[in-house]
Image: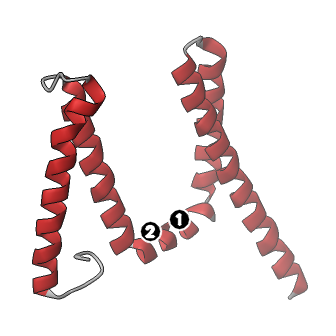
Amino acid sequence: MGISNDDKEINRVAAIFYGAGGGLIIDEVGLLLTFDNYWTSLTYSFLIVFLAIIIVLMFFYRYRLAILGEIAEFTTSKVSLYLGIFLAAVSVGFIVQTDNFFVTVLASIVVIISVIVVAVFLIKKLKMTSEKQHL
């Protein structure tokens, strides 16, 4: 409510609901995730991750047009091609050198994203050259 509306009173009510709900979630996460041990670092880690995700989502919602414009501009630059190739090569190196499952999964995700970035760059370049030939 508070993010999508510019009314001052609605923002206050949304902040109260958000604060109360966040407090209840964080209060119980220690009990739920640590089996009655409130004083573990997992509770604080969950709080930080939860708040970071909420803040990132708020920024993405608020600045979505600017972010999409920046992504469109990035995918047409050669930097995206070089960065995609570099990340794919480094990630494949991690996959080859490790036996850790978490590192392998994370590096595989980075390889997939890198291949997508390179493919988008190449598709846009091919589309631009075909449009120039038709003119």
Work out which quarter of the rendered image holds the C terminus and state it: bottom right
Extreme residue in the right direction: 134
Q: Which mark is residue 71?
A: 1
Closer to us: 8 or 89: 8
What kind of element bears circle 1? helix
Q: Which residue is mark 2?
A: 67
Q: Which mark is residue 40?
A: none
- Which amino acid does the dot numbered 1 rest on? Ile
Classify residue 93 by image quadrant: top right
Vertical relation: 75 (above or below) 84? below
Work out which quarter of the rendered image holds the N terminus and state it: bottom left
- Give the image location of residue 125, x and y in percent: 75, 65
What kind of element bears circle 2? helix
Vertical relation: 47 (above or below) 39? below
Closer to us: 33 or 84: 33
- Which amino acid does the dot numbered 2 rest on? Ile
